[in-house]
Image: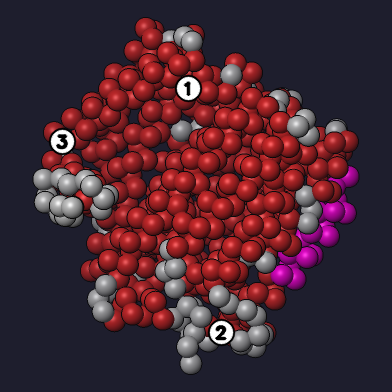
Amino acid sequence: MKTPGGSNASMAEHSGGLARTLRRGAVMSGAGLIITQAVAILQTLVLARLLTPTEVGIFAAGTVLTVLLMDFAGGALTQALIQRQHDVEDAADTVFWVTLGTGLLASVVALVTAPLMGHLFDNALVTLVAAATSGTMLMHAATSVPDALMQRRFQFSRRLIVDPAVAISFAAVSISLATLGFGVWSLVFGYYASLAVWIVASWWLAKWRPGGGRVSYGLWREMAVFAFPLLLEVVVARVRDAVELVLIGHRLNESALGNYRYGRRIAMFPGIAVVQICSYVLFPAFSRISDDPVRFKSAFLRALGWIWLAAVPTAALMVALGEPLTVLLLGEPWRGAGVALAAMAGFGLGEAMNSVSSESMKGAGRADRINWMILAGVLTGLPLLVLLLPLGLAGVGMAISASAIIVGITGLGLARSVVGVSISEIAARMAPPLLASIVAFAVIAPLERFAVHADRLPVLQGIGMICLEGALFALVYLAVLRVLAPSIFAEGVRAARRVLDRIPGVRTSSGANQTPNP
């Protein structure tokens, strides 16, 4: 019997083309991510000029519970569906009806408890927003199985179509309504519009309908054993996020909450890129090669090296230039977002380590080890936040960064024995980019702080100076990396050439992909 997720993946595996499939997937996921992130950045810039930090803060407060329950409703059962090797049709039907039921239950809970959210933040508008967005969880649950099946069969076109369509629909609706003066409600309507587009696009692409299999309680129990640690990880993270928002709203104010939301949003752009590409490409790949120790170890080190190569300089740039760039792009009322952005730069470093580690453990069927990462997050996240909250948004950002890095290091330690990799092998991949970024930061940060002051310049001139500082940072980073790790530098150059060779009309010295004469 043909399973919903078997054909494409099996062909790649049997032909020995899994590596080519993954490279193509990474490129397609990256292309879709570039479009999505570009839309998200544009939307953030425009809405920051149309809405106040307080309005954004009210939306963040009103959706605290829906965001928390949404992951519970979507569940980690979809991860078990991706990892499953048999009875896929029955598993798909089982997961679909379970997630739809939990989505309905979560929506009812959110609606009933909406007044509690208004009481927590002492704002009646928060109650209305919480009640109005309660239905989003049922809509989100409807996308879970189609998305999981597309990921399982390496259907990378999803990243090129669904994600950009969702981002564009939210941006178009929210910006249009904000321009008309709808305030916080522009975000609510944009939220619903994006979910509607998500449902239509994912079901259209997946070409799957319920009823092809049968719902099985035994299958649900079997998948729930695999999914429980993953669900626990998500729930703990969302509870921590919710408590963070409540603490910031209580101890500071709604304007600070809005600044925090936008600062965190910008800080998470690199982390989101890491998570989306890793989860969509690495998890199904690791699931298929985990029984081959040599390939598994090699793939783990390559993935960690490539992600770390980009994550470390990005974090250093955020610390050095995050605040002035935010002020230039969003305006002076959003300076707090820039402070939070710079302080949260460590989040991306933690996500880089966390993503590769957790995806490798899930792929090897050792998801239970993720519980220790969850424990590390619980023991560090909220205690650090309470300790550093008196420092304002900078303290909040530092707490998030420190906790993410601790969780990431814990994940690497746990993944070592699963993958069979040594500390020295991990250090050989991670140390050179880290040292090169520190040197580049030591050049750029004093230059901006004591000489340039880009945020005091006219907008275009200031952005131009930021770009020049970023270019100087890149030159220093690459020069130091070439000295410290020539092999890593050369590998990066070869990869860049391969990417350029795929662009029509571009030919590098590798000689690949020459365009024919007309």
Classify residue 409 as left or right of residue 169: left
Label 2 environment density (alpha carbons within 10 Å; few <14, some 14–19, many ≥20) = many
Which amino acid type is shown beneath numbered disc 3?
Arg
What's the residue at 82%, 38% (across, down)?
A: 126
Secondary structure found at label 1? helix
Circle 2: element type: helix
> Mark 2 vs mark 1: which is more N-terminal?
2
Mark 2: which amino acid? Glu
355 in relation to 431, above or below = below
What is the spatial separation of the Cα atoms under label 1 and label 3, in whole angstroms?
Answer: 28 Å
Residue where numbered disc 3 is placed? 482
Q: Which residues are magenta?
A: 100-115
Q: Amino acid at mark 1?
A: Leu
Q: Quadrant of residue 96?
A: bottom right
Badge 2 vs badge 1, beta-carbon distance below 8 Å: no
Q: Residue at x 59, y 63 (%)?
A: 201
State the residue in front, 349 or 100: 100
What label does residue 89 carry, if any?
Answer: 2
Query: Could one spot residue 242 in this view of the protein?
Result: no
Q: Which residue sits furthest front? A: 518
The label nearer to you, 1 versus 3, is: 1
Q: Position of residue 472 (x, y in %)?
A: 27, 22
Q: Which residue is mark 1?
A: 325
Q: Give the image location of residue 109, x and y in percent.
A: 82, 58
Q: Is residue 107 magenta?
A: yes
CA distance separating discs 2 and 3: 50 Å
Magenta run includes residue 302: no
Q: Is residue 37 above or below residue 31?
A: above
The answer to which of marks 1 and 3 sits earlier in the sequence is 1
- The crowding category of the residue bearing disc 1, from other C-alpha atoms within 10 Å (few below 14, some 14 to 19, many at least 20), is many
